[in-house]
């Protein structure tokens, strides 16, 4: 699928020689091509490429979409409808973005509509819902068609109340009738000209508005103020309000200050002031009330300039200068620095240089948890020039950052993977921190993009430099650096006096044989925790599974509860006292007895972060234990609160999933424990060893960062695993050489490109037949050696859909990627065109992780 845009916007025509214009628009739907609409003559001078327009699509759907191109060629296959309305008079999507979105759709084998859906904050999309309203010509007394009982109920609901032109949504009609199948009554009423349908549209974005007050202009002069004091001498409460206002707003020094006013809440919420006195002053014209649109990211205006100064160490200066030298000949540079080497300070210095040159900067992080810590540091340096963008922000907050980038207010943006969609048009520097992280990959829904790769392409389109940073780079990234395609700069020493932590392997199998295990802790880890806590130092424990237990089991008959929608067992969550599926969210109550045999001998098996937290609170009652995983970080500011508590040492032990492994910087952590290393190593994936090495090294790097000697204890039942030796010596180069040899021998990235196709259907046999047909089509086009499968994955059913997977491996050297992808799309289209497979879902995942 190849997409291109005509970015030339026609010059306005005079009224005498106007021509008919057509606009190609991107609908937020999974359509394979753009759709063309006619521009009304009277609106031809308003058309804006990258702006939003309102169009009708299908019989009753009204959608907002993005104008991609304007031209004079009508569509050949259909009659172009008119654009209903132009929403924007300036682009909300820039031309560099449109070019990037087209590349994403083509590279990741999805549609442009799916990219737009993922890219735009939902508050920028107009919502549309069908509503029912009485027909203006309907008169009950003269109407010729009799109404049934249910039809009369709808008419009565639309007629009651004083509201003129009252309307109901489809959902509300269903509630009025008390039935699920109500559409036939609406259709009948429409045929009788009793009601009509319309689309109720509203722009979801609403700016934040605060109520403010200011002193009426006539009282600003000193003489007038003295007269006012005389008027209020007997009205003590009102006089207190005026005095409070004057304390907060220096009207004597600046009339402009009075014009800006003061938030009304500052007066009405003050404990010693009367809210009614404030309202009386407004009513009497002494205070004026007005609304003001304000930022959702308030900052002190004096904070807009840099006010935090730091000095790079000699090693950091050398690394920064080396990066700048590499940038002279390379677009992309890899900064390979050990954990705690001070990469963030180098990033900040490079950001300053980019801003001094007038450019924009995007700073990508893999996890929202990291933004909480890093934003605090960057805010002290860049103040109001800094924007933050991630999914925990509300829709309105994300729109504000989007608009801030468009207007130039935010010159630096810190964000997670979705930040690559922001409307940059003058990027000077892109930083991808912890570039190896799998969190940069979007799994579902489409587009299944990798933010690192999208950031590299965006930087290429805009002529920006890109800095990739990691202590454990992705094998593919390091391969490109060693091949000379990327620049490479290494930082081998930790910042300041901090040294690398000591790593100790502890054999859990031996401890279990000797019966010295304390719940899930070896005696070595338990003793070390007690020692560190006695020294007022902090501990991080890593377990890559959330919940209390992976599953429960009846010890008498062997029953294990399974998800009704997915082919997985249900995990037990103690806090909610329920069984929960981690794939579809299905949950069930915890049974008191086995539903199969009636036995009460039902026990939990295994352990997750919740159980570790629970056990520690009993075993270490003197310690404050907190947990950081998906369950405890669902609320907007929960990450920030957990990290803040740990930084302020209100928490002694932090238990977490992989969230705790990524780039967090805590001065007082001297011990890290990896509870179950084996579950990460023994995973059926060619990247399992790479991911395990990265995770172990990263989480180990949280210990001993500020001069304290750190210690890491890894619990494993297989200490002879070859990967542990490399982790203990922190030898990335040796690990890389081992891994790249394996990849070359078995034909995996970076030597091959991989595309995974997933076939889904609610009927397992239909899915299998569709997968077989797709495989045959692929073999015919790409060759048998390039196609593996089909086969059912380890988890073969998710959300009631049975899955089949086909893996395509394409040689980087001998394959024209664009042609190969065209063949893949053609094969998928063959399956979609078969009548029996109309309900089969096909998903393509390019460069799966």
Image (cartoon, grey):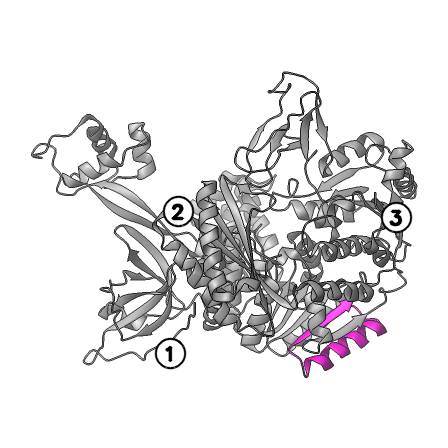
Real-space Cα separation, disc 3 to disc 1, in angstroms: 63 Å
Secondary structure under the numbered disc 1 in the rendered image = loop
Q: Which residues are drawn in magenta?
A: 310-337
The N terminus sits in image quarter: bottom left
Label 1 crowding class (10 Å Cα cut-off): few <14, some 14-19, many 20+?
few
In the rendered view, would you say 147 is above or below 830? above
Earlier sequence position, callout 2 versus callout 3: 3
Return the x and y of residue 788 as percentages of the image width and height. 57, 57
Q: In terms of depth relative to the viewer, which is nearer, 436 or 15?
A: 436
Residue drawn 29% across the image and 34% down it: 173
The C terminus sits in image quarter: bottom right
Return the x and y of residue 453 as percentages of the image width and height. 59, 66
Real-space Cα separation, disc 2 to disc 1, in angstroms: 40 Å
Residue drawn 60% across the image and 54% down it: 248
In the rendered view, would you say 198 is above or below 556? below
Q: Along the horizontal axis of the image, is 224 left or right of 147?
A: right
Q: In terms of depth relative to the viewer, which is nearer, 632 or 72?
A: 72
Label 3 close to label 1 by CB (< 8 Å): no
Q: Disc number at residue 468? A: none
Label 2 close to label 1 by CB (< 8 Å): no
The residue that disc 2 covers is 839
The residue that disc 1 covers is 8
Real-space Cα separation, disc 2 to disc 3, in angstroms: 52 Å
Q: Nearer the viewer, mark 3 or mark 1?
A: 3
Q: Along the horizontal axis of the image, is 478 left or right of 35?
A: right
Q: Name the outermost residue toward the bottom.
A: 329
């Amino acid at each position: 699928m190849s997409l291109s845009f005509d970015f030339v916007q026609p010059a306005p025509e005079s009224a005498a020689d106007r021509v008919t214009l057509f606009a190609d628009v991107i609908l937020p739907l999974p359509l394979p091509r753009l759709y063309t609409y006619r521009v009304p003559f009277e609106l031809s001078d308003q058309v804006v490429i990258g702006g939003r327009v309102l169009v009708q699509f299908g019989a009753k759907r009204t959608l907002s979409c993005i104008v991609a191109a304007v031209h004079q060629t009508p569509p050949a296959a259909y009659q172009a409808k008119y654009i209903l309305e132009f929403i924007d008079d300036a682009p909300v999507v820039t031309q560099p973005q449109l070019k990037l979105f087209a590349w994403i759709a083509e590279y990741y084998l999805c549609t442009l509509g799916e990219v737009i859906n993922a890219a735009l904050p939902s508050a920028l999309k107009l919502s549309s819902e069908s509503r029912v309203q009485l027909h203006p010509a309907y008169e009950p007394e003269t109407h010729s068609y009799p109404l049934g009982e249910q039809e009369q109920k709808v008419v009565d609901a639309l007629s009651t109340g004083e509201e003129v032109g009252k309307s109901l949504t489809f959902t509300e009609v269903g509630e009025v009738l008390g039935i699920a199948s109500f559409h036939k009554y609406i259709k009948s009423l429409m045929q009788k000209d009793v009601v009509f349908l319309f689309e109720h549209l509203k722009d979801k974005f609403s700016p934040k508005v605060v109520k403010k007050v200011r002193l009426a202009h006539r009282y600003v002069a000193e003489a007038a103020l003295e007269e006012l004091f005389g008027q209020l001498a007997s009205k003590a409460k009102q006089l207190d309000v005026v005095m409070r206002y004057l304390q907060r707003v220096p009207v004597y020094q600046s009339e402009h200050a009075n014009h800006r006013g003061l938030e009304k809440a500052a007066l009405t919420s003050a404990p010693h002031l009367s809210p009614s006195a404030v309202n009386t002053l407004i009513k009497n014209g002494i205070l004026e009330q007005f609304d003001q649109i304000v930022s959702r990211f308030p900052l002190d205006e004096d904070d807009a300039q840099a006010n935090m100064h730091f000095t790079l160490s000699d090693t950091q200066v050398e690394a920064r200068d080396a990066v700048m030298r590499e940038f002279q000949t390379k677009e992309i540079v890899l900064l390979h620095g050990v954990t705690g080497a001070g990469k963030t300070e180098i990033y900040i210095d490079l950001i300053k240089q980019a801003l001094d040159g007038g450019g924009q900067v995007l700073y990508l992080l893999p996890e929202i948890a990291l933004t909480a810590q890093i934003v605090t540091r960057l805010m002290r340096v860049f103040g109001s020039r800094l924007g933050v963008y991630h999914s925990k922000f509300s829709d309105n907050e994300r729109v504000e950052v989007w608009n801030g980038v468009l207007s130039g207010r935010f010159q630096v943006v810190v964000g997670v993977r979705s930040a690559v969609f922001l409307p940059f048009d003058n990027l000077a520097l892109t930083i991808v921190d912890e570039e190896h992280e799998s969190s940069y990959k979007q799994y579902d829904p489409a587009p299944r993009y990798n933010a690192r790769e999208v950031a590299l392409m965006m930087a290429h389109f805009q002529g920006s430099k890109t800095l990739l940073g990691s202590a454990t780079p992705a094998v593919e990234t390091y391969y490109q650096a060693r091949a000379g395609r990327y620049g490479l700069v290494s930082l081998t020493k930790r910042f300041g006096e901090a040294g690398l932590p000591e790593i100790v392997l502890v054999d859990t199998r031996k401890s279990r044989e000797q019966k010295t295990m304390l719940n899930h802790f070896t005696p070595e880890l338990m003793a070390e925790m007690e020692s560190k806590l006695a020294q007022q130092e902090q501990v991080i424990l890593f377990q890559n599974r959330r919940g209390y237990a992976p599953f429960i089991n009846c010890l008498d008959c062997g029953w294990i509860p399974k998800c009704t929608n997915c082919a997985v067992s249900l995990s037990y969550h103690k806090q909610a006292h329920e069984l929960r599926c981690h794939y579809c969210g299905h949950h069930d109550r915890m049974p008191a007895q086995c539903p199969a045999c009636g036995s009460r001998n039902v026990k939990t098996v295994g352990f997750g972060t919740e159980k570790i937290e629970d056990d520690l609170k009993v075993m270490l009652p003197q310690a404050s234990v907190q947990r950081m995983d998906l369950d405890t970080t669902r609320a907007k500011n929960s990450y920030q609160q957990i990290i803040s508590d740990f930084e302020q040492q209100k928490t002694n032990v932090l238990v977490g999933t992989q969230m705790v492994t990524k780039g967090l910087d805590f001065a007082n952590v001297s011990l890290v424990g990896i509870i179950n290393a084996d579950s990460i190593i023994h995973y059926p994936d060619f990247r399992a060893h790479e991911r395990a090495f990265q995770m172990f090294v990263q989480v180990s790097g949280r210990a001993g960062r500020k001069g304290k000697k750190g210690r890491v204890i890894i619990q494993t039942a297989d200490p002879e695993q070859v990967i542990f030796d490399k982790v203990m010596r922190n030898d990335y180069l040796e690990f890389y050489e081992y891994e790249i040899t394996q990849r070359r021998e078995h034909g995996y990235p970076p030597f091959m490109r991989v595309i995974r196709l997933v076939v889904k259907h609610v009927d397992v046999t239909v899915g299998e037949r569709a997968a077989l047909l797709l495989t045959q089509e692929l073999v015919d086009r790409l060759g048998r050696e390039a196609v593996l499968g089909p086969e059912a994955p380890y988890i073969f059913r998710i959300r009631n859909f049975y899955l089949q997977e086909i893996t395509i491996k394409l040689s980087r050297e001998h394959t024209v990627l664009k042609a190969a992808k065209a063949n893949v799309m053609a094969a998928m289209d063959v399956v979609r065109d078969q009548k029996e497979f109309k309900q089969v879902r096909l998903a393509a995942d390019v460069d799966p992780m």
